[in-house]
Image (cartoon, rainbow, N blue to C red):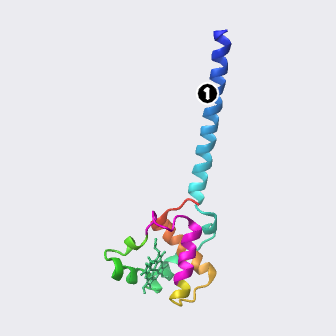
Amino acid sequence: MTHLFSCIHISQRVRQLTVAMATAVACGASLAAGPAIFKDADLKLGEQLIAQNKCTQCHVSKVGGDGSAMYKPQGRINEAGLLRGMVEQCNSMLNLQMFPEEVTAVAAVLNRDHYRFAK
Ligand code: HEC
C-alpha cells in the first residue's frame, strides 16, 4: 500500500513541476513582448517627441535631478493603459497636438525607461 501511495505522490509532484515550468515560460514570453498596446510602438519617434516637447525639462524644473522622479511606477499610474492615458492627458492639456500613434510611442519609451509594466 505504501508503494502505491508514493507513486501518486510523485505523479502529483511532476504535475506541479510541469505547471510551474509552463508558467515560467509564459511569463518569460510576456516580459520580452511587453504590454500589447506598445507592441508596434516606434521607440525612436517616442524619444524624439520627448526631447522635442520638453517633457524632461519641465519635469526637472518641478522635481529636480534628471526629472525622472516625476515618474512614479508605484503611484496611481500602475499599468500600461493608464500610462498611455496620462500621456494623452498631457498631450491635450499642453496642447502638444501629438497623433495617437505618437502618444503611444512616447508612453512606450516611458515604460521602457521608467515604469517597466509587463502588461
Ligand atoms: C509645463 C510642464 C510640463 C511639461 C511640458 C510636461 N509635463 Fe508631465 N507633468 C508635469 C507635472 C507638474 C506633473 C505632475 C502632475 C500631477 O502629479 O498631477 C506631470 C506628470 C506627468 C506624468 C505622470 C507621472 C506619474 O507617474 O504620476 C507623466 C507620465 C508625464 N507627466 C508625462 C509627460 C510627457 C510625456 C510630456 C511631454 C510630452 C510631459 N509630461 C510634459 C509637468 C509637465
Q: Nearer the viewer, residue 43 or 11?
A: 11
Q: Residue furthest top?
A: 1
Left or right of 37, for residue 111: left
Whether 104 is drawn above or below 15: the answer is below
Query: Residue visible at 54% across and 73% down?
Result: 107
Give coordinates of residue 31: x percent, y percent: 56, 55
Chain part drawn in magenta: 72-90
Q: Does the magenta run of residues contain 87?
A: yes
Residue assigned mark 1:
13
Whether 9 is drawn above or below 2: the answer is below
Query: Residue visible at 63% across and 22% down?
Result: 10
Q: Does the magenta run of residues contain 85?
A: yes
Q: Amino acid at mark 1?
A: Arg
- Image-quadrant location for residue 33: bottom right
- Image-quadrant location for residue 14: top right
Give coordinates of residue 25: x percent, y percent: 61, 45
Query: Residue visible at 63% across and 70% down?
Result: 40
- Image-quadrant location for residue 84: bottom right
Q: Residue furthest left?
A: 65
Give coordinates of residue 26: x percent, y percent: 62, 48
Left or right of 107, for residue 56: left
Location of the N terminus (image quadrant): top right
Whether 94 is drawn above or below 22: the answer is below
Element class at badge 1? helix
Q: Quadrant of ligand 1?
A: bottom left
Q: In the image, is the residue at mark 1 within 8 Å of ligand 1 by its beta carbon?
A: no
